[in-house]
Amino acid sequence: MDVSINRVLKLGQQKLKKNGNDDYVTEANILFGYSANKTLENIFSRLEDRVPRRTRERFMQLVERRVCGEPISYICERSCFYSNEYIIKKGVFVPRPETEILAEVVISEVKKNHSNNLICLDMCTGSGCVGLTIAKETGGTKKIFLVDKSLKALRCCRENQEAMGLGKKTKLIHSNLFQSVPRTKFDYIFANPPYIDRSEEESLDVSIRHYEPKGALFSGSRGLFHIKKISSDSRGFLKKNGKIFLEVGHTQAEETKNLLEVLGYKSVESFRDLNKIDRVVAGTWKK
C-alpha cells in the first residue's frame, strides 16, 4: 500500500531520532530526496503525494545505514562545502565546516595579492574541496596543484574538478607529501593534514572511527607529524615572501606557531573558526 511522502518522512525521522540523531529532520529529508531523486523544494510542495513501495523501501534502507553510523555524505555521495556541492566517495575524507576557515583565509589572501599569476599547492587535498573552492572563488590563481597520496581520493577529486570545470586552473598530483611534487616555487601552500593523535581514536564518533579513512585522520608525534613534515619541507617549495596555511587541531595552534617560528617563518599568526578555536596557523617564508 502506497503512503504519503509526509508519512514516510515521519517514519524515517522517528527512526533517526530514536537513535539519538539531533539532525533527524534534516537528514531524513536529504535521504528521502536522494532515494526518490527529488529536490527538497519538490518534496515540500507535494507532501501528500503517494510514495511507490520501491522508493519507500530504498529510503528506509538508507535510514538504516545512517542509524548504523555511516556518514550521510557517503550514503548520498555528496557533501556541501563553502556553498558548493562536492562528490564524496567511501574512503575519502568528508569535508568539515571548520575547514571552511582555511579556504576563507587563503581566498582573502589571494584577493589581497592583486596578482593574476599565483601558483599554489593544496597538500592532502582529499576530495579537493579546499583547493577547488579557492580556484573557483579567485581570479588570481594561475594554477593550483592538488596533492594526495591516496589514489581513491584523487579519483574523487578529479570528478569534482571536472564537474566544476576547473581542469585548466588545477592539476592533480599523486604524491606522498612532497615526494613527487615538481620542484616548483609556490606563492601559497595550504593543507588540511591528518592531525588526530591515535590515542584519541576511541573517543571519536562511530561515523568517523568506523567509516572514514584512517590515513586522512591520524598522525604520529601526538598528531603533529604531518604538520611538522609539511612545515619543514614547504621551505624548499615556497617563493620568498610565500605563505603557508595549516589547519590544526583544537589544541595544536600554539605549538604549531612555535614550530613555524623555529623553522624560520615570519609573521606567524592564527585564525579562529566559528567556535572561536584557533583553527588555521599561517606564516611567511622570507628567505
Image (cartoon, rainbow, N blue to C red):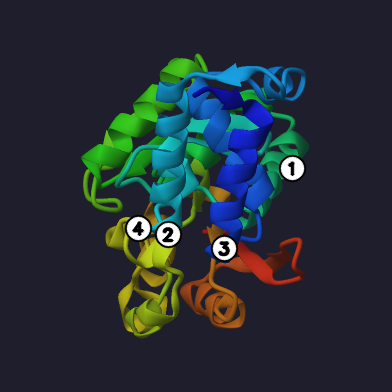
Q: Decide: marks 1, 2 in contact (CB < 8 A)?
A: no
Q: Image quadrant of residue 146? A: top left
Q: Decide: marks 4, 2 in contact (CB < 8 A)?
A: no
Categorize mark 4 by other alpha carbons within 10 Å: few (<14), some (14-19), many (20+). many
Mark sitting on residue 108? 1
Label 2 is placed on what type of residue?
Pro
Residue that carries the numbered disc 2 in the rendered image: 193
Label 3 is placed on what type of residue?
Lys
Callout in the foreground (1, 2): 2
**Distance from the alpha carbon under mark 1 to that under mark 3:** 43 Å
Residue that carries the numbered disc 3 in the rendered image: 18
Categorize mark 2 by other alpha carbons within 10 Å: few (<14), some (14-19), many (20+). many
- Left or right? Give the position of 277 relative to 190: right
- Classify 144 as above or below 252: above
Callout in the foreground (3, 2): 3
**Distance from the alpha carbon under mark 4 to that under mark 2:** 7 Å
Categorize mark 3 by other alpha carbons within 10 Å: few (<14), some (14-19), many (20+). few
Q: Nearer the viewer, residue 87 or 224?
A: 87
**Distance from the alpha carbon under mark 3 to that under mark 2:** 35 Å
Q: Image quadrant of residue 147? A: top left
Callout in the foreground (4, 1): 4
Q: Residue at image x 51%, y 38%?
A: 129
Q: Position of residue 260 (x, y in %)?
A: 53, 72
Residue that carries the numbered disc 4 in the rendered image: 216
Q: Earlier in the sequence, mark 4 or mark 2?
A: 2
Q: Position of residue 5 (x, y in %)?
A: 63, 27
Callout in the foreground (4, 3): 3
Q: Nearer the viewer, residue 34 or 252?
A: 34
